[in-house]
Amino acid sequence: MILKYALLWVVSFLGISAVDALWHFGLWGRIYRADIRKVAAIVDGKPVLHNASGLLAQVLVITAFVVLASLHFNSETPVLKAVVACAMGGVLGISVYGLVNHWLIRDWSPAMTVLEVVWGPVIGALAGAFIAWAAKLLRMY
């Protein structure tokens, strides 16, 4: 069972991270690119990113989603409960991040705040559905 959970985590990390990248770099990339330049350290015209911190943040969020979803695998409605639990996890992990950044960081834009507040429950719900689906395929419930 441990190998199934490890595989579930890897598949979830890849799938959810791809959707997250599409949101941030594809759908709303223009807003994020323009607005992040207002708050990021810039060297040679490019934002300085701390890749290790970004990767760790993604690992923690995906791990939380997998744990939240898996708590409901043995319930009567595992998909619904995984979707709701992960949506709430998205509110706590992503929406609150956007609101706190808007509160603390002088040039954090209202547009980025709205995008993060909306994205939290959306990515969470998508993650919950994806994780429940993948777990079903892996015969974890």
Image (tube, helix red, strand yellow):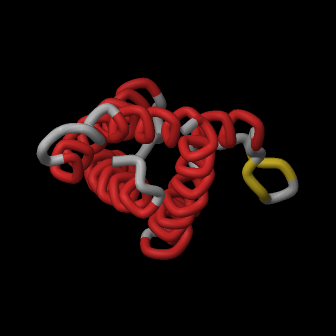
3 left or right of 87? right
Q: Residue furthest bottom?
A: 26
Residue 86 falls in image quadrant: top left
16 left or right of 97? right
Task: Let me know if residue 31 appears in the view.
Answer: no
Q: Residue at x 27, y 53 (%)?
A: 125
Residue 111 falls in image quadrant: bottom left
Whole-percent x, y for residue 138 in the image: 47, 57
Q: Residue at x 47, y 30 (%)?
A: 105
Whole-percent x, y for residue 78 in the image: 22, 47
Note whether 46 is above or below 71 in the view shown.
below
Q: Quadrant of the N terminus?
A: top right
Q: Nearer the viewer, residue 80 or 123?
A: 80
Q: Nearer the viewer, residue 61 or 42?
A: 61
Note whether 84 is above or below 138 in the view shown.
above
Whole-percent x, y for residue 52 in the image: 76, 37
Note whether 128 is above or below 34 in the view shown.
above
Note whether 95 is above or below 118 in the view shown.
above
